[in-house]
Image: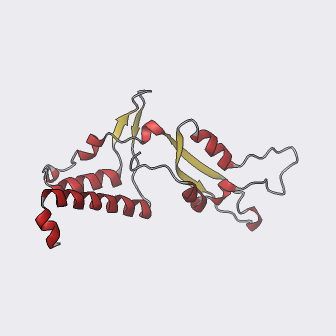
Amino acid sequence: MSALNPLTTDELLAQAPALFTEEPHFEVSEMYHFIPTIDVINEIKQHNWYPTSVQEASVKDASKDGYQRHLVRFRHFEDLEVDPQDLLIPHRIEDEHDDLYTVLNVLQENLLRGNISGINKETGRRFTSREITSISKDVDVNQGLWNIAERIANIKEPALALAA
């Protein structure tokens, strides 16, 4: 998809364990019909909406841990597709060069800072990508960019690659 990869099940579990609670809190009424949040998330995913961020409230009463209020933000699959050409648009005059290093920096900035706008081709709805704030996602993006740059450098200047 894009730099705005949907959260995996493991990431959801790590960030908001309450999403996976399988039964209601013991204090709720018998009239309460419990539906695990993860079941709702999985149903929504069937319609091409994917969780991109999650929050979980803290609890004062330890017995309510795992039952606290939580929020899941979704984005439609089409909104997760950032036009590759948009990623190459420099934001500073100094970045208007076509050497590998400069292009790598422009890509890095655009992927990490977000704020890439687009229009959903089916609905015509406008969207803007979000900044990557997760350390692990930041490292993944940077490592991926570096690997691509190394491969390109090996193709363009194989003699230099051997020296490094």
What percent of the width, then of the height, locates residue 162?
16, 70
Report whether 164 appears left or right of 110: left
Where, quadrant-wise, is the N terminus in this rendering?
top left
**In front: 161, or 111?**
161
Whether 156 is drawn above or below 160: the answer is: above
What percent of the width, then of the height, locates residue 69?
67, 53
Residue 59 quadrant? bottom right
Report whether 158 appears left or right of 140: left
What residue sits 56% from the left and 53% below the top? 54
What percent of the width, then of the height, locates residue 91?
22, 48
Residue 84 quadrant? top left
What residue sits 42% from the left and 64% below the top? 135
What residue sits 18% from the left and 50% below the top? 92
Furthest toward the right, the residue is 30
What percent of the width, then of the height, locates residue 31?
86, 43
Where, quadrant-wise, is the C terminus in this rendering?
bottom left
What residue sits 58% from the left and 62% below the top? 14
Whether 81 is drawn above or below 109: the answer is: above
Q: How many marks?
A: 0
Which color scheme is applied? secondary structure
Furthest toward the bottom, the residue is 163
Whether 2 is drawn above or below 46: the answer is: below
